[in-house]
């Protein structure tokens, strides 16, 4: 166990290496989330999967808003250290789909900057946050330490899939390989995302 913890610490602290081109922030071919239903069917599936939640009244552009009150597939999403996640039901199902990637690293908590936010993009279009279909993950809770994106994401590792890449990069690689997230934006893409990983699914 001690050797494993040491190995993890080394992976988390790796700085800069060069490993090919960084994948684009937007992937039109990542359409697995289009299979996730909305509305009452989504709420029913969320209940069947054991995700504790409260259905909310309509909020702006969000079609099926929920407040998640428990973990999602063994991963708890927090803000300010407390469980908190308001999003569209479909994003909650997507996070359940993605949970095995995080659990394979024994991650139990993800601190985020927010999911639903009624705002537009710089081009004036509704952000996927405004639809409740995006989340900004800032910190990941490993068994032996809590790791922030701003300090531990390694710049310049391309797709981050190399075995010697930092842990956070390899986690992002696993999430990208699900073909679930239409938008997957990291600190490698721009300064706006220097401290978080943006994950968003396609609207129906």
Image (cartoon, rainbow, N blue to C red):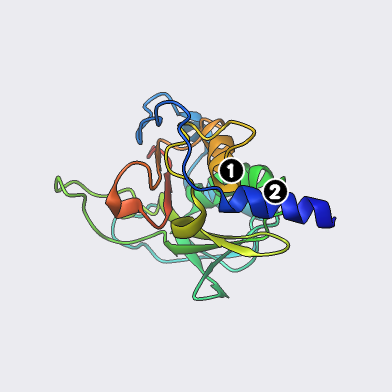
State the residue in front, 32 or 3: 3
The location of residue 89, given as percent across then percent down, is 50, 52
Callout 2 secondary element? loop
Choose top left, top right, bottom left or bottom right for residue 188: top left
Say which residue appears at 60% left-offset and 43% top-offset. 98
Q: Quadrant of the C terminus?
A: top left
Distance between the Cα atoms at labels 2 and 1? 8 Å
In the depicted structure, whether residue 141 falls above or below residue 12? below
Callout 1 secondary element? helix
Q: Residue furthest right?
A: 1
Choose top left, top right, bottom left or bottom right for residue 203: top left
The location of residue 95, given as percent across then percent down, is 56, 48
49 left or right, relative to 84: right
- Say which mark, if any, is on residue 125: none
Q: Is residue 45 visible?
A: no
14 left or right, relative to 118: right
Q: Quadrant of the N terminus?
A: bottom right
Please give the residue where the numbered disc 2 appears in the rendered image.
105
Please give the residue where the numbered disc 1 appears in the rendered image.
171
- Are discs 2 and 1 less than 8 Å apart at CB? yes
The location of residue 189, given as percent across then percent down, is 33, 41
127 left or right, relative to 177: left
Q: How many marks?
A: 2
């Amino acid at each position: 166990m001690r050797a494993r913890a040491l190995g993890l610490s080394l992976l988390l602290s790796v700085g800069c290496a060069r490993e090919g081109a960084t994948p684009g922030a937007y992937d039109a071919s990542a359409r697995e989330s289009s299979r996730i239903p909305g509305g009452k069917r989504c709420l029913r599936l969320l209940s069947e999967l054991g995700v504790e939640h409260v259905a909310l009244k309509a909020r702006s552009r969000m079609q099926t808003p929920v407040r998640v009150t428990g973990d999602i597939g063994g991963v708890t999403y927090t803000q300010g250290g407390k469980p908190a996640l308001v999003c569209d039901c479909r994003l909650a199902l997507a996070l359940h789909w993605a949970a095995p990637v995080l659990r394979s690293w024994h991650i139990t908590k993800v601190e985020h900057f927010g999911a639903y936010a009624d705002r537009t993009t710089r081009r004036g279009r509704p952000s996927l946050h405004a639809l409740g279909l995006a989340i900004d993950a800032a910190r990941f809770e490993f068994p032996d330490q809590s790791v922030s994106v701003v300090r531990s994401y390694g710049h310049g590792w391309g797709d981050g899939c190399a075995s010697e890449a930092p842990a956070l990069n390899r986690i992002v690689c696993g999430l990208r390989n699900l073909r679930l997230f239409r938008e997957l934006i990291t600190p490698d893409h721009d300064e706006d995302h220097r401290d978080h990983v943006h994950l968003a699914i396609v609207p129906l």
